[in-house]
């Protein structure tokens, strides 16, 4: 039997792109998205794609702590891609989406139709920067929804249409951690907006705090059901990539000042 050719950088980046979006338990050869990527690559089987996903898990510090291991040859192939991601998350994530669009025979705007509204009237470098930002935010949302099993960490709402990948330290404030899953929380649109406006906060014990401004509305019918019932309670935490306490502390200091 002929030996399969070595994976190219583009193929490895596409496997990494899928790794970011799939829960660990779904990285198997029978998964629809694994089969789709194998078909897209053409010369790879679903089994080989699943193996590469496991290789990426073996270089991920979270899974290393769990004892996940991959074949040494595969480890050595994927480690440079992982290191590139750690040192330049935004560039690699965007490149992975650009390559994915190319393999599908589409433009990146066609694979992310949700961003086209923001691009009206824009040209040149301004348009390029916004495309990159919106595409990376879209991937971040997929990463966070995967991590939280598509459930709001406060209310448990599980309708993806209503869920947002909320940043703990805002996107504009920390370039290095814009795509760090430990800097994200899955929230419904309502709680994300309340978090953004500092009406609520999450402390370093993962408990929900309510602002003085919000408590001025305790007599309102909605207060108890939507906010009061969750005060002081721990949010639902994911199995992996829990919100980093350093990020929570930064947000908490802004909330209490």
Image: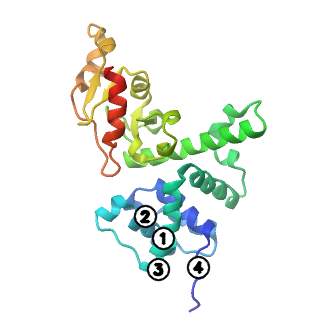
Q: Residues within 10 Å of mark 2 (few under 14, many from 20)?
A: many
User: Residue, x 26% and y 17% (percent of image)?
Assistant: 224
- The residue carrying mark 4 is 6
Disc number at residue 73?
3
Q: Rounded to the nearest whole Å, what is the CA distance between mark 3 and mark 4?
A: 10 Å
The first of marks 1 and 4 along the sequence is 4
User: Residue, x 49% and y 62% (percent of image)?
Assistant: 82
Disc number at residue 52?
1
Residue furthest left as drawn: 232
The first of marks 2 and 1 along the sequence is 2
State which quadrant residue 72 falls in.
bottom left
User: Residue, x 68% and y 58% (percent of image)?
Assistant: 104
State which quadrant residue 235 falls in.
top left
Q: Rounded to the nearest whole Å, what is the CA distance between mark 2 and mark 3?
A: 19 Å
State which quadrant residue 27 falls in.
bottom left
The first of marks 2 and 3 along the sequence is 2
Q: Rounded to the nearest whole Å, what is the CA distance between mark 1 and mark 3?
A: 10 Å
């Amino acid at each position: 039997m002929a030996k399969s050719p070595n994976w190219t950088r583009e193929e490895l980046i596409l496997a990494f792109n899928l790794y970011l979006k799939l829960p660990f338990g779904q990285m198997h050869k029978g998964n629809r998205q694994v089969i789709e990527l194998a078909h897209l690559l053409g010369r790879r089987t679903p089994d080989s794609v699943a193996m590469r996903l496991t290789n990426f898990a073996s270089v991920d510090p979270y899974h290393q702590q769990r004892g996940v291991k991959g074949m040494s040859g595969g480890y050595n192939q994927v480690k440079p891609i992982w290191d590139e991601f750690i040192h330049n998350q935004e560039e690699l994530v965007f490149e992975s989406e650009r390559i994915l669009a190319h393999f599908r025979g589409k433009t990146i705007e066609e694979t992310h139709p949700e961003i086209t509204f923001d691009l009206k009237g824009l040209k040149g470098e301004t348009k390029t920067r916004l495309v990159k930002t919106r595409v990376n935010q879209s991937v971040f949302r997929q990463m966070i929804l995967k991590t939280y099993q598509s459930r709001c960490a406060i209310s448990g709402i599980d309708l993806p249409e209503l869920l947002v990948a909320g940043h703990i330290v805002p996107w504009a404030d920390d370039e290095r951690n814009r795509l760090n899953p430990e800097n994200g929380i899955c929230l419904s649109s309502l709680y994300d907006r309340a978090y953004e406006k500092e009406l609520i906060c999450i402390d370093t014990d993962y408990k929900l705090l309510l602002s003085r401004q919000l408590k001025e509305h305790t007599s309102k019918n909605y207060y108890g059901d939507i906010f009061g019932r969750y005060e002081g309670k721990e949010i639902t935490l994911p199995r992996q990539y829990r919100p980093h306490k350093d990020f929570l502390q930064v947000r908490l200091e802004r909330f209490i000042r």
